[in-house]
Image (cartoon, rainbow, N blue to C red):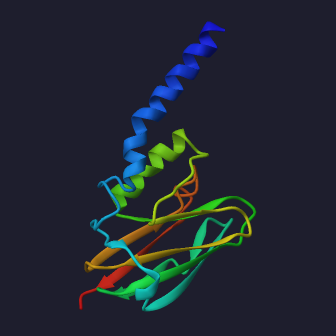
Amino acid sequence: MKTTHHLLVTTLLAGLSMAPAMAAGTHAGGHGESAIGQPGKAANVTRTITVDMSDNMRFTPAQLSVRQGETIRFVVKNLGKVKHEFSLGTEQELLEHYEVMKKFPDMEHDEPSKVSLAPGAKGEVIWHFSKAGTVNFACLHPGHYDAGMKGQIKVAKK
């Protein structure tokens, strides 16, 4: 009983220490502008891109192009039989979050740059690309990223 209690307390304390980071929305902090842009508004969507996720651990398409200043609605579909997610970020942010997901594989997300989907489900991410460069996306469920479930968005300068 004492060991079980100690494990429970340790787990709860670990979760509480992570709460501010998770509540902040991104590892950079907050829901404001980051290195990859900022959450978009539905009223400002300039176009919609459909992204399919499958159990072959791939996104279709895996390479996308947008222009700086565009607000994109990503309609994300999980065509597989296991849970997948679409998560935008810098490569470093995605790798950091992947390590957390390995420890807490059932973690739920409530962030504008991510959508986790059950098999057969559909969701969306609306994102404003305010900076030129490369934005990465990936599925960070344990094993999926390592299997190649990732892609890139090239953001062309205005």
Q: Residue at x 28, y 65 (%)?
A: 34
Question: Can residue 126 be seen in the rendering of this structure?
Answer: yes
Quadrant of the rendered image containing residue 56: bottom right
Residue at (37, 45) in percent of width and height: 21
The residue at the far front in this view is: 43
Between 44 and 56, the residue placed more toward the observer is 44
Where residue 33 appears, as percent x and y from the top left, is 28, 68
- Is residue 96 in sight in this rendering? no
Residue nearer the viewer, 68 or 9: 9
Residue 62 falls left or right of residue 120: left
**Residue 92 spot, x, y in % from top left:** 33, 56
Compared to residue 128, the image places residue 20 above or below, namely above
Quadrant of the image containing the C terminus: bottom left
Residue 35 appears in which quarter of the rendering?
Answer: bottom left
Residue placed furthest toward the top: 2
Residue at 44% across, 33% down? 16
In the rendered view, would you say 153 is above or below 99? below
Give the image location of residue 39, x and y in percent.
39, 72
**Quadrant where the N terminus lies?**
top right
